[in-house]
Image: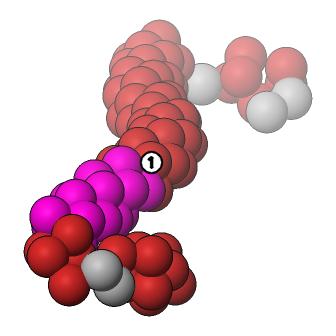
Amino acid sequence: MKNDVLRRLSRTELLTMLRDQELEISELKAENRRLKKQLEDRRIKIEESGSIAEASLKLTSIFVEAQKAIDLYRANCLVESASSAGSADGGTEREEDRIQEEV
């Protein structure tokens, strides 16, 4: 408002305007706090999703290594059982080759 208009207003009208502006400022500050909180929550979610993705990749590599160890153990067990069974009939080498091809 221009100074001329403000000078013509009564004290009550000026105080009413001041009170209305204070209420508006208070509402805007509350909205600002709410929006800042939403923004922070979204930042946290974005950071957590990055952390979850990284953890998932690490777990995947752990499971791959575990599967390799299981396969190796299984192959060794099969070779051992073939060796002990093959010594009776002499077909150990062929059986070991077949088992290695399976793995």
Residue 79, picture quadrant: bottom left
Q: Main secondary structure of the magenta part?
A: helix
Q: Which residues are magenta?
A: 67-84
- Against 33, residue 38 (above or below) is below
Toward the viewer: 88 or 58?
88
19 is within the stretch colored magenta: no
Q: Badge 1 is on which residue?
A: 65
Quadrant containing the N terminus is top right
Q: Is residue 73 left or right of residue 23?
A: left
Residue at point 36% right, 49% down? 69
Q: Is residue 11 visible?
A: yes
The quadrant in which residue 45 appears is: top left
Relative depth, front residue between 53 and 98: 98
- Queried whether the magenta region covers residue 78, the answer comes back as yes
Q: Could you tell me which residue is drawn at 33 percent across and 84 percent down? A: 91
Amino acid type for the residue under numbered disc 1: Glu
Q: Of residues 95 and 53, which is closer to you in this image?
A: 95
Q: Position of residue 99 (x, y in %)?
A: 39, 80
